Image (spheres, grey):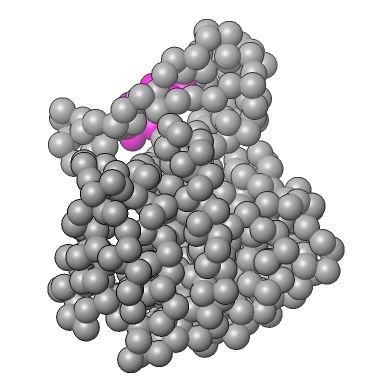
Amino acid sequence: MLEGLDAVDWRAVRQAFGDGAHLPGALRRLTSADAQERSAGYWKLDNYVVVQGNLAPAAVVVVPFLLEIAAGSASPDTSHGAEEALDLLYEIGTGYSDDPALVEAARAAVAQGAEVYWRALEQGATPGSRSTAAFLLASLGQPELAPRLLVAARAQTDEELVATAVLRAAEAAECGLPAPPAFVAELERFAREASGDDFLAAAGAAALAMVARAATPEWAVERLLESMTTAWPPAQPGAGHSARGEAGRPVYALRAVGLSALLRALVLVEGEREARHLLEVALEVACPGLRVRHCWDRYDKDSPRLLVRHYEKLDAAASAWVPHDLVRAALAAAPLWTVQSDLLDCYGLPTTREALAAWLAVQS
């Protein structure tokens, strides 16, 4: 394995902090049977070729070797490093750069491994390999993969993997909306059949909403609303990219349904962060000509553990874009008012509950 490493002039390969002389050693460590050794190899790659998603030219060069490692995912005897390799491939394939040519080259290189990802999803020796393979396939931007992803979801025996794969099937289909009616019908059938399991029922409803959009049936919307107030158990160790970790997925799915669904959720949630996220998304949907940019996050001086989000102020006339139904929902959402935020101020709206109520009374 990795016989081609020595054929590359690694000193001529640029990683984020210099040349790539250390990368062959990191790739070899990634195949070790020792977990600590694999972890060391992983970080010697992750922290240099795709730093927090930021691509370096070396990312494209290491992809063929990562694919070679990932190809062994189906067997416990050859799967050492496969899970880590798949994770790195996903980071590279979804990475960013100021150089569009580098992004295109990285995505094209990762796309060459589609069959490797299918093998990992359908036969992978570890849940992490299967889960990350589903994410990789969905990230390829090929809606024609959606039906096969849904079939793969049904074939999984672990509910974590079922949920992950069905959401990825919907994500793939989103690249080519409107989705074929037969696929939407199959998703709806999956969501209905999952009604006996709250977690799978929520995942199925979210997947259906992602492709059905405004035509999402009311029973599926109700499931999404219920899932907003459900505390799911954490993902199992080793689950890789997990559906349980997608805290924003119900919000994302509700956004696809439309503003009214977001406002229904806003008055239901009990957490301040969830309510603020919903309000932010609802404002973006209601005011498509405006978009608030996050300026920074900081810890509040009076409550060091409380993260406060700051936003860039929009034109003062922005309040004219905000529907009164949205303002009424915000007033009814008690968690929104537990922390001072400048989100409403960005839209030219009062930032206290009392002042906002008075503003609405005048406008109405």
Above/below status of 275 relative to 123: above
Residue 181 in the image, given as x and y percentages of width and height: 84, 63
Which residue is at the front of the view, 363 or 222? 222
Which residue is at the front of the view, 8 or 90? 8
Q: Quadrant of residue 71?
A: bottom left
Residue appearing at x 24%, y 31% in the figure: 298
Quadrant where the N terminus is found in the figure: bottom left
Residue 177 in the image, given as x and y percentages of width and height: 75, 51
Above/below status of 292 relative to 363: below
Residue 298 magenta-drawn? no
Residue 130 in the image, given as x and y percentages of width and height: 46, 76
Residue appearing at x 61%, y 79% in the figure: 152
Which residue is at the front of the view, 156 or 286? 156
Residue 339 magenta-drawn? yes
The magenta segment is 337-345
As drawn, the residue found furthest toward the right would be 181
Residue appearing at x 63%, y 25% in the figure: 287
Residue 163 seen = no
Q: Quadrant of residue 276?
A: top left
Residue 133 seen = yes
Above/below status of 26 relative to 36: above
Quadrant where the C terminus is found in the figure: top right
Q: Is residue 42 left or right of residue 171?
A: left
Report how many numbered discs are placed on residues in the image: 0
Above/below status of 12 relative to 1: above
Residue appearing at x 15%, y 30% in the figure: 302
